[in-house]
Every structure is written in C-alpha cells, then in structure tokens.
Amino acid sequence: MMTNEEILAAAGVTREWCGQWVRREWVAWARVQPGIREHPGWLTPWAELGEPDREVDRRIGGALFCAGWRACREQSLRSGEQSPDVPARLPGVGLLLGRAPGPAG
C-alpha cells in the first residue's frame, strides 16, 4: 500500500496545495454561519494563518486527497483496470488538479 506521501508525489500534488484547498473550503463554510461575528478567526485567510493551523489543514487535505485516490484506485481495480496510476487519469482527479485553490479568505 502506498503512503500518503507517495500518493501525493505520484499525483503531483503538494501538501501546501491540499492545505490551501481545505482552508478555502473552511472559509467558504464559515462565511455562511449565523454566528460568524462571534468567531472572526474562522475567516482568517491562508496567508495569515500560523504554522500550526497551516499544518492541520495540510494534514486534513492530504488525508482527504489520498482517501479519494485510494477509493478511485480500488474502483478501477474492481472494474478490471490494473494500472496503479489509474486515479491520476480519472476525470474527477484531473478536474480537481486543474483547479488552483486560490487565496482562502
């Protein structure tokens, strides 16, 4: 079984990209919360996060990306495809990688 680091490297995805993606989604969620005025830190953009918060987002994003990659690979193997790089060729992963996360905030 490939490690998360090996999957990210094979897919050409960085932990930084994963962290920015998580933060962008977090901020989008936070903006629609009714109590956001009580939690202004929820809107802190990636560029202003401290290193501990960035590391959490990197870990979450990397784990989610790798879980999706493994699920795609398992589905591909069940359908008869034997190539280990199948997830990188699936349309959903290509679409995901084609989108830069942009600034979170």
Image (cartoon, rainbow, N blue to C red):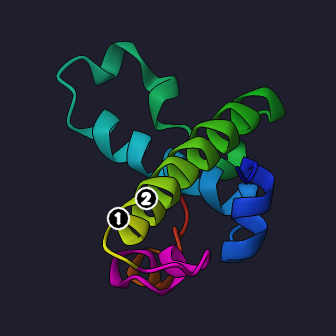
> Percent from the top left, x then y, of residue 57?
62, 38
> Percent from the top left, x then y, of residue 64?
51, 45
Q: Is residue 102 above or below residue 61?
A: below
Q: Residues within 10 Å of mark 2 (few under 14, many from 20)?
A: some
Residue 25 seen by the camera: yes
Front: mark 2 or 1:
1
Residue 105 seen by the camera: no
> Percent from the top left, x then y, of residue 84?
61, 74
Asked if the residue under mark 1 is in contact with the one under mark 2, i.e. CB atoms within 8 Å, the reply is: yes
In the image: residue 77, left or right of residue 59? left
SS at mark 2 in the image: helix
Identify the residue at image location x=42%, y=40%: 26
Write down the residue under mark 1: 78
In the image: residue 36, left or right of residue 90? left
Amino acid carrying label 1: it is Arg
Q: Is residue 82 above or below residue 46?
A: below
Residue furthest front in the image: 80
The label on residue 74 is 2
- Find the distance from the CA under tag 2 to the CA under tag 1: 6 Å
83 or 65, which lies in front? Answer: 83
Q: Which residues are magenta?
A: 81-93
Q: In the image, is residue 43 part of the stretch drawn in magenta? A: no
Q: Residues within 10 Å of mark 1 (few under 14, many from 20)?
A: few
Amino acid carrying label 2: it is Glu
Identify the residue at image location x=59%, y=42%: 63
97 or 7, which lies in front? Answer: 7
